[in-house]
Image (cartoon, grey):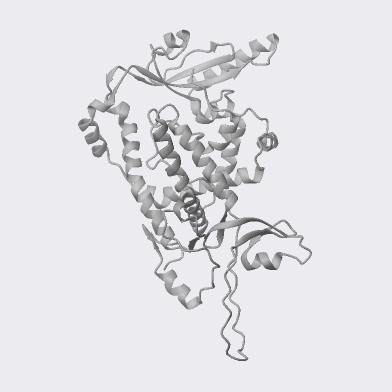
Amino acid sequence: MKKTALFAALLFAWPLLGQNPPATNPPPQNPPAQTPPAQNPPKLEQPPMAAPEPEEEKKPAPVKKPETPTATTAPGGTKVTGPAATAAKPASAEGKMVEEIVARVNNEIITSSELDKARASAEEDARQECSGKCTPEQLQVALEDRQKSALRDLIDQSLLEQRGKDLAISVETDVVKQLDQIRIGNNLKDMEELEKAVSAQGFNWEDFKNNIRNKILTQQVISREVGSHITIGHDEALKVYNEHKAEFVKPEEVALKAFEVSTEGKTEAEIPELKKKAESYLQRIKDGEDFSVLAKRFSDGKTAQQGGYLGEYKRGELAKELEDKVFVMKKNELTGVIETKQGFLILQVLEHYTEGVQPYDKVENDIMEHLYNQRMEPVLRDYLKTLREQSYVVIKPGYQEMTGGGNSEIEEVSTTPESTKEKKHHKKYLLFGKSSGSK
């Protein structure tokens, strides 16, 4: 049986939770694309432009080298920057400099600690993706590529979050659902227990929720502004199938979902009642309730958040008892309640692939998703480029190599005269139409 991620991995891999694999469940017309790692940069208001003072006499102004902007903690614990940071710093030195600003995205900032976290996360992702697949040289190239793009990804993430706010997209309901799925997947009684578990792992609870909120927000922005303009027709997918049939040869495999009722830590007297509980869930599924929905809500298995999805298995990859049962079953058939050392198990066969070239209806979802992702990549890249061009993005010297270059030294945002604002805003279009405020 394939192992699933530990609790810490569940906390970080939340975007994947609750999604069923494309090979076995019809994907949405516009499946979510990958997004840059979520961050929660502090808000920074543009410094107001001071009115010019009357000149007493014309003297050349002394040339003063600009200081490197830093983030400062004010007495109340609020992080402020630039001139505001200087103003917030009391003479008693109660405020203190905490970190430098490496980039500014409109009125938001990206700090050195946020960049460090993003680079560490990028390295971990590269190692996971290359695990067992890459040579040491290929892994090194992947690590270098991820490191170089870390700051650019943070900038893109910030731009997508800001765009989501401009579009007034509300994701609070989705955030609550996602948190509840994580809670259920970790067998926790309530949100208070989840908060304690998150804190015990060394994460700040508010940051944890904000990361979930920002990732959902950016996914919805991409789906609305980019994905909704990508369509894959049936004829196009069928053409790919006919031209590449050799690529759809599979060994005999079964794709499975599981519903588990755990008996670990239970007494012998409790076992019969737990078996009845498993049998009642089996009957509910037979009566028409959705297997995935029940698994997300009630399964004790580690795959509950994925609707119980286990994966695809060839002969020889399952325990003999399970293999003998599922390899004679057809699509959507259910096993009875199977007793194991860990508890009671119900399996559903999502798909049974016969050996050889697979019929079109069994691989249509795979083809659709492949074509969608293939088309999404360049369109999303162009969309992000458009957002960057329409925004004020400045990078501190020494960090440009992480963004692809072409950015100037970080500096303060000056106030734009209203007349110029109106002209620029009137011309401000996104890739697929006007921005929310355009007329």
The single residue placed furthest to the left in the displayed view is 243
Q: Which is more toward the observer, 351 or 158?
A: 158
Task: State the residue at coordinates (59%, 32%).
Answer: 8
Vertically, is 188 above or below 172?
A: above
Vertically, is 5 above or below 48?
A: above
The single residue placed furthest to the bottom in the displayed view is 57
Q: Split into 4 quadrants, where in the image is the C terminus? A: bottom left
Task: State the residue at coordinates (68%, 16%).
Answer: 265
Res. 181 in view: no
Task: State the residue at coordinates (47%, 73%).
Answer: 421
Q: Can you tell which quarter of the image residue 27 is in?
A: top left
Task: State the residue at coordinates (38%, 33%).
Answer: 26
Q: Can you tell which quarter of the image residue 43 is in?
A: bottom right
Residue 195 % position (x, y): 68, 38
Residue 197 % position (x, y): 67, 34
Res. 78 in view: yes
Q: Which is more toward the observer, 235 or 286?
A: 235
